[in-house]
Amino acid sequence: MKAILNIPQAWAKAWSSSTFRNQFVLTVIFFIVVSLHNFHYLKVWQSRPGVWIDDIFHSFLVPINSSIPIFMLEYTSLALVFTLLLMQPERLMKGLQAYGLVLFFRTVAIYFVALEPPRDMILLNDPVASLFLHTNDVFVTKDLFFSGHVSGLAIFFLMANNRFIKTYVAIATVLVSLFIVWQHVHYSFDVAFAPLASYVAYKLVYWLDPATRESTELQDA
């Protein structure tokens, strides 16, 4: 609770640095542009043909609708990590950069790997994603390689530096990965590749800005 009460002080201190202000504004612009680009092209690519994959895991997992537990695990993880990072403005900024890079990677990956959704897919009902992605005319189902839900959770895990929150997000990542494959929303390799993409994005943002690397490593210790 004491740390939460110190959020205004932490942001006042961070905002007093012109370097932080400039980088944070650019980060927010980058994140918004990449998000809009991602949502736009996922709708465009929905109309193009792709290929079906015979997924060995789908062959012995009868699909079940796990939309509610997926939604709860995803967004409770987001809420916990976002609240934690509000106390660490620099780390929050890096999290936005990493998430933005993951969205960019995903947009490119989906362009080059055109897939049809599994034939017995049960549609994933995500009210938050639906606000930005689906319309009355288009319900996006071909945003497959790689999983957005799992890559997002992987970013939350990497950014969290509280032991209990990190453990919760790790469990959530495993469960959501299982539920998504079981619901036949994604192929198993979509889910398996997602954490790797997130890890590359996470490492890249710190490699590009080594000045923050030391402070982040101290926070992780």
Image (cartoon, helix red, strand yellow):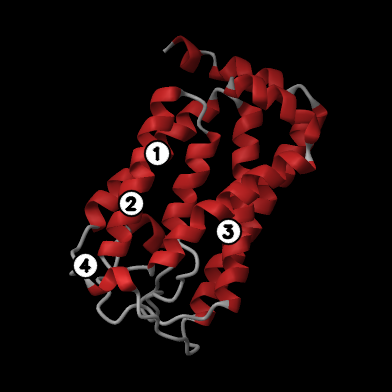
Q: CA distance from mark 4 to mark 1?
A: 23 Å
Precedes in sequence: disc 2 or disc 1: 1
Q: Residues within 10 Å of mark 4 (few under 14, many from 20)?
A: few
Distance Cα–Cα, label 2 vs label 1: 10 Å
The label nearer to you, 3 versus 1, is 1
Q: Which residue is mark 2?
A: 176
User: Which residue is denoted by mark 1 in the rendering?
Assistant: 170
The location of residue 142, given as percent across then percent down, is: 43, 76
How far is the residue under mark 3 from the one under mark 1?
A: 20 Å
Quarter placement of the N terminus:
top left
| Earlier residue among tags 3 and 1 | 3
Of mark 4 and mark 3, the one earlier in the sequence is 4
- Local secondary structure at mark 4: loop
Residue of label 4? 61
Q: What amino acid is at disc 2?
A: Val
Q: Type of residue at label 1?
A: Ala
Q: Quadrant of residue 59?
A: bottom left
Q: How packed is label 2: few (under 14 Cα within 10 Å), some, or many (20 or more)?
A: many
Q: Is residue 123 left or right of residue 199?
A: left
Residue at the (55%, 35%) spot, across then down: 159
- Is residue 166 in view? yes
Q: Nearer the viewer, residue 145 or 143?
A: 145
- Say which element carries label 1: helix
Q: Report the residue at 28% width, 57% height from top.
A: 179
Mark 2 or mark 4, which is nearer the start of the sequence?
4
